[in-house]
């Protein structure tokens, strides 16, 4: 993971942890988002990612190849995230990502 990608992830975690009595670390948050951890105690942290973290930070996590929109969408379902502007945006972006053929998009050969 690049230095900039780690800084962006740390920014998200810092925003999530600010009001929480117990913090989450970067590795645990990623494991929650990728479906590797489902401990109920982390639900509020995952919800905070979609409620409190600016959409540009979430988007950069995808651009940095830390997570995909599909993984984020699956995390929303698994952690039962509801009523969030970012949740709706992630689902929309995941639908675009799933509808794109492998040769399409940024960085494709022309």
Image (spheres, rainbow, N blue to C red):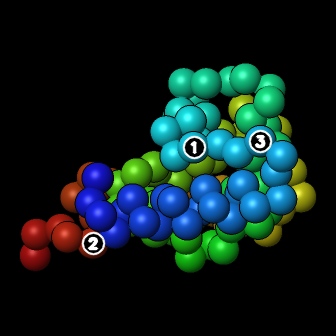
Residue marked by disc 3: 22
Q: Do we see residue 44 in this rendering?
A: yes
Residue 7 location, x and y as percent?
42, 66
| SS type, badge 3 | loop
Q: Nearer the viewer, residue 88 or 52?
A: 52
Q: Is residue 36 toward the left or the right of residue 21 in the image?
A: left
| SS type, badge 2 | loop
Q: Nearer the viewer, residue 90 or 44?
A: 44
Q: Do we see residue 95 in this rendering?
A: no
Residue marked by disc 2: 106
Q: Is residue 92 toward the left or the right of residue 83 in the image?
A: left
Q: Nearer the viewer, residue 81 or 19?
A: 19
| SS type, badge 1 | loop
User: Which mark is in front, 2 or 1?
Assistant: 1
Give whichever of discs 2 and 1 has the lower sequence position: 1
- Eyeballing the image, is 17 above or below 4? above
Where residue 101 is drawn, which disc sits there? none
- Eyeballing the image, is 15 above or below 32? below
- Quadrant occupied by the C terminus: bottom left
Residue marked by disc 1: 25
């Amino acid at each position: 993971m690049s230095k900039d990608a780690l800084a962006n992830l740390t920014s998200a975690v810092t925003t999530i942890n600010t009001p929480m009595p117990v913090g989450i670390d970067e590795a645990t948050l990623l494991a929650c988002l990728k479906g590797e951890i489902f401990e109920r105690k982390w639900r509020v942290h995952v919800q905070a990612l979609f409620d409190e973290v600016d959409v540009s930070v979430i988007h950069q996590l995808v651009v940095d190849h830390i997570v995909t929109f599909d993984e984020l969408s699956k995390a929303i379902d698994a952690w039962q995230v509801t009523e969030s502007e970012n949740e709706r945006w992630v689902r929309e972006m995941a639908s675009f990502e799933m509808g794109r053929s492998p040769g399409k998009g940024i960085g494709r050969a022309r």
